[in-house]
Image: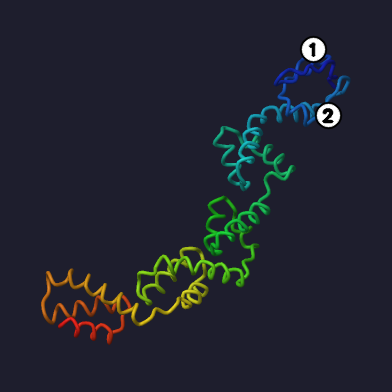
Amino acid sequence: MPVIKKIKILKNKVKLQLEDSSVIEMDKNVYSNFYLYVGKDLSKKEIKAIETFNDTSTYMNYALKLRQKSLYSEYHMREKLYDKGANKEQVDFVIKKLKENGLVDDKAFIEEYIEYYNSLNYGKNKIISKLKEKGIFEDELEKVNFPISIERKKANNQLPKLEKRYEKYNETQKKQHIYQALLSLGFDIEIAKEVSDKVKTSSPREENKKLERDFEKALAKYKRKYQKRELKSKLIGHLASKGYKINDIMLLMERKGL
């Protein structure tokens, strides 16, 4: 077995001079990962490991820089390394080292990701969708538990913001918009319905103001094309589709002389 005769530490590199006159050159981070000293016998397996580590040092440094900036699932880290030009052997080696040091851990990645999106009050379906985008596979996601009490709390946390966003709409429309918004935020149908049903009831005065506003808009639109009975029919259909009560629509139309 080759014996290390001399170790020369340079600025960015380390050179091992062997007794058979051959030289092994490596990055400093490679050197620090092996127990190397003058007089050490290097087996073929050790030399192969050093060469493999040395070949992957560029990719290892790249992976470490990525990890410093953000969390990565194993799948996405592999994709990044392949995009950088690494082959399968190099990628497997880097991923193995990252796992050994706890720098790639899909279980921890999932936990941190869920904690972050729970803090934003996103529903489980959106969180799962985003985890899939990050390369987490179905079998891992099936192990994740989303307690219904937490889902309900997050949806209720969204409600004040959504009520403000849709405050210009009448009560029926507001509920519909909030229901759809909760679904798009990732909540199950049951939770979305339960929470949207809690929308504050508008006062009759507020509802009438919104009805009159929508009536005037519809009248300006339809009176260009329709008259009398047809106009009235179009107005009733339009306002009813927005959730206004027929009796309220008819009373307003009487006041307007239609």
Residue 223 occupies which quadrant of the picture?
A: bottom left
Q: Is residue 152 above or below residue 74?
A: below
Mark 2 and mark 1 residues within 8 Å of each other at the beta carbon: no
Quarter of the figure with the N terminus: top right
Q: Among all residues in the image, which is located at the extreme front?
A: 205
Q: Residue at x 30, y 79 (%)?
A: 208
Quarter of the figure with the C terminus: bottom left
Residue 143 occupies which quadrant of the picture?
A: bottom right
Residue 118 occupies which quadrant of the picture?
A: bottom right
Disc 1 marks a residue whose amino acid type is: Ser
Query: Quick one: SS at disc 1?
Result: loop
Q: Is residue 223 above or below residue 35?
A: below
Disc 2 marks a residue whose amino acid type is: Tyr
Q: Mark 1 sits on what residue?
A: 21
Report the coloring of the rendering: rainbow
In this orientation, which residue lies closer to the viewer: 187 or 7? 187
250 horizontally vs 226: left or right = right
228 horizontally vs 252: left or right = left
124 horizontally vs 256: left or right = right
Q: Mark 2 sits on what residue?
A: 35
Q: Residue at x 62, y 62 (%)?
A: 142
Query: Quick one: SS at disc 2?
Result: loop
Label 2 or label 1, whichever comes before in sequence order: 1
**Alpha carbon distance from label 2 to label 1:** 21 Å
Q: Residue at x 47, y 65 (%)?
A: 161
Q: Which mark is residue 220?
A: none
In this orientation, which residue lies closer to the viewer: 9 or 20? 9
On the image, the x and y values in percent for residue 137 come to 59, 55
101 horizontally vs 109: left or right = right
On the image, the x and y values in percent for residue 147 come to 63, 69
Q: Is residue 187 above or below residue 61?
A: below
Q: Residues within 10 Å of mark 2 (few under 14, many from 20)?
A: few
